[in-house]
Image (spheres, helix red, strand yellow):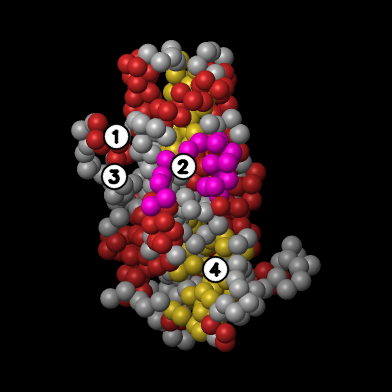
Amino acid sequence: MDSKPKLVTGTAGYVLQDVPHLTDYIPNLPTYPNPLQNNPAYSVVKQYFVNVDDSVPERITVHSDSPRGIHFRRAGPRQRVYFDADEVLAAIVTCGGLCPGLNTVVRELVCSLYHMYGVKKVLGIDGGYRGFYARNTINLTPKTVNDIHKRGGTILGSSRGGHVTKKIVDSIQDRGINHVYIIGGDGTQRGASAIFEEVRKRGLKVAIVGIPKTIDNDIPVIDQSFGFATAVEEAQRAINAAHVEAESVENGIGVVKLMGRYSGFIAMHATLASRDVDCCLIPESPFYLEGHGGLYDYIEKTLKENGHMVIVIAEGAGQELVSESIQSTNKQDESGNKLLQDVGLWISEKIKDHFAKHKTMAITLKYIDPTYMIRAVPSNASDNVYCTLLAQSAVHGAMAGYTGYTSGLVHGRQTYIPFYRIIEKQNHVVITDRMWARLLSSTNQPSFVDSKCVNEDAKEDH
């Protein structure tokens, strides 16, 4: 049976959705003074240790009579720690698809353990979850990870699937690992939650910590996931190229497909950043091709007015239309994600066929798919800072005895979020929200939805 959510209530409707602690199921654990108090780098920092009552609200926009609402425990170093540096054997694993910043997180986990807490034994698990029981480990030191942040991908290797909870925990127990840092998306965090529950059942003194990784930015609660800012920035290169191609010919159309299986955040933010995009299509906003107000109608209107246009489409957009015209399959990858049809290629062909059939105007269309170029680059400066904060916060929490949590940014503050909040649902673009309205005003594209759909979405959001 899974552990129950740990809730702490206070006055005026205050609720702390707390994270588990080793002392919840292992009594009388010894504690030690935090070695940071003797670290000259931190001796000048006022109030470096986080107060035991510090928490961060989930919502910051409130009314005068609103209850204080849900809060999360603030991340950071505590005055007492539950692990002696010499007893710690830490393991780091990266799972799922590639994402800018993976190597930065690995580097900062190793350096934080080593330089802040004096932990000298850190293992890298090779090849994702299955590496716990099927492959050798890699010894990690500050020297071996010194410049890995300058490279894309992950030096540990990654894979989808391979999560067999009992085998993984058996390996953790047999090797004597007592810190596990798991970097991955919602499926990976779901696996981390299962590992934590098994560790708790066995009564092991092992801290299980998640670090959220999804280039699509579809993990709930947190402000954004690492690698997202880099992905949006890198997408500009593809959009710029599409714009140059489209602008250089008569009735030119540039189509760019970006990541976004279920959530259109990259497409939306890349469109807003570019200002060269005339139409952005995302999974959350259905669209149609034929008829008045449809995509074909808008393309023809834009070409007549501007002589060229750029379309950005997320990989999960329009899948219901693709399924109607192409033999759809229900195959999944090893992470359980449905294998999608290539909507960028499909819509490019549909647009070309439409204008060839109706002969209203001659068009030239160029299709660009930069997916693997974007996810394989090193993280930019902004993401590098974010990765550092995530990794340091994760280490502080594990040393303080917290477990079963994900390290994440909420309203600009580092927090510890219980696994069940991270895996309960996916984060989506809300098409009745101001951000999507800003995009529509930027591109001047039709919304492709009628008032009935908007009202239904608004009811669901409420």
Q: Position of residue 230 (x, y in %)?
A: 57, 41
Query: Gap in Å between the C-alphas at discs 3 and 4?
Result: 31 Å
Q: Secondary structure at mark 3?
A: loop
Q: Amino acid at mark 4?
A: Glu
| Tag 3 near tag 1, CB within 8 Å | no
Q: Amino acid at mark 2?
A: Ser
**Magenta stretch contains residue 200:** no
Query: Gap in Å between the C-alphas at discs 4 and 1?
Result: 38 Å
Q: Residues within 10 Å of mark 3 (few under 14, many from 20)?
A: few
Residue occupied by mark 2 = 447
Q: Nearer the viewer, mark 2 or mark 1?
A: 2
Query: Gap in Å between the C-alphas at discs 3 and 1?
Result: 14 Å
Residue occupied by mark 1 = 322
Q: Secondary structure at mark 4?
A: loop
Q: Nearer the viewer, mark 3 or mark 1?
A: 1
Q: Residues within 10 Å of mark 1 (few under 14, many from 20)?
A: some
When the figure is inspected, residue 171 is found, relative to residue 281, above or below; the finding is below
Residue range in magenta is: 435-452
Q: Secondary structure at mark 2?
A: loop
- Is any atom of residue 97 visible in this view? no
Residue occupied by mark 4 = 58
User: Which secondary structure class fits the magenta region best?
Assistant: helix
Q: Nearer the viewer, mark 3 or mark 2?
A: 2
Q: Position of residue 461 (x, y in %)?
A: 44, 61
Q: Earlier in the sequence, mark 3 or mark 2?
A: 3
Residue occupied by mark 3 = 338
Query: Gap in Å between the C-alphas at discs 3 and 2?
Result: 26 Å
